[in-house]
Amino acid sequence: MVSTGREGLLRTHFAEVLARESACLAGVTDGAKLADWRRRVVEELMTPPSPYVLALRQTGDVPDRADFLDRWRELIAETVDRLLQSGTTGDTHFSSGQTRRADVDAQKTAVLILAALHGGSTLSQIAKDPWPLNAALDLALAPFAATEDDSPARTGTSSPISNMNS
């Protein structure tokens, strides 16, 4: 199949995001580094011309998009698994005395994180506020609760969902 210039450009964005994510996620070994990764990705997703924003658009060849998302999910799953193996999870215990770690599935968590990135970024771009993206990531990263913070860039300044109709 001959690719158009637009599809080729989209593949370039996919490759750039995967290269960055491969390097960045490989360095995530604890909650602080996970928080750094989160802040960087939120910043990328809130910057309209970013390759991240362009790669997550609902355009382009479906098999290429599926491959991109599957490869990004796998990078996230490897990171989640590494964090779980190292014991990097929140301090919350269940009534049985077990930590959340025993209940966390790396593959499902990776899908949840990727869904939070995709859906949260869509809502945040419409609202022009990072709050929806951060709210989605709060839930997706709940097993690693130490990664949360309440910085103004993270929390937003208003009710972003209501701003979507503005």
Image (spheres, rainbow, N blue to C red):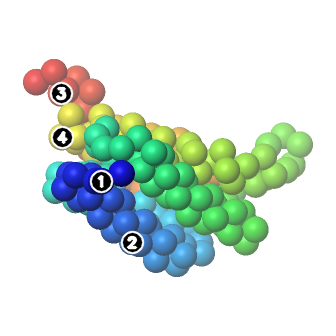
Quadrant in the picture for residue 8: bottom left
* Residue 72 image offset from top left, x and y in percent: 50, 58
In the image, is residue 116 above or below residue 106? above
Query: Which part of the image, by quadrant, shows the C terminus?
Result: top left
Identified by mark 4, the residue type is Lys
Horizontal side, residue 91 vs residue 140: left or right:
right
Quadrant in the picture for residue 9: bottom left
**Cβ–Cβ below 8 Å for labels 3 and 1?**
no
**Residue ID for mark 4:** 128
* Residue 69 image offset from top left, x and y in percent: 47, 50
Identified by mark 3, the residue type is Asn
Local crowd at mark 3 within 10 Å, few (<14), some, or many (≥20)?
few
**Cβ–Cβ below 8 Å for labels 3 and 4?**
yes
Closer to the chain start, of discs 2 and 1, is 1
**Residue ID for mark 3:** 163
- Using the image as rendered, state which of residue 29 and residue 66 is in the foreground: 66
Closer to the chain start, of discs 3 and 1, is 1
Marks 2 and 1, how far apart in space?
27 Å
In the image, is residue 59 above or below residue 31? above
Q: Is residue 121 visible?
A: no
User: Under tag 4, what secondary structure?
Assistant: loop
**Residue ID for mark 2:** 20
Residue drawn at (62%, 48%) of the image: 109
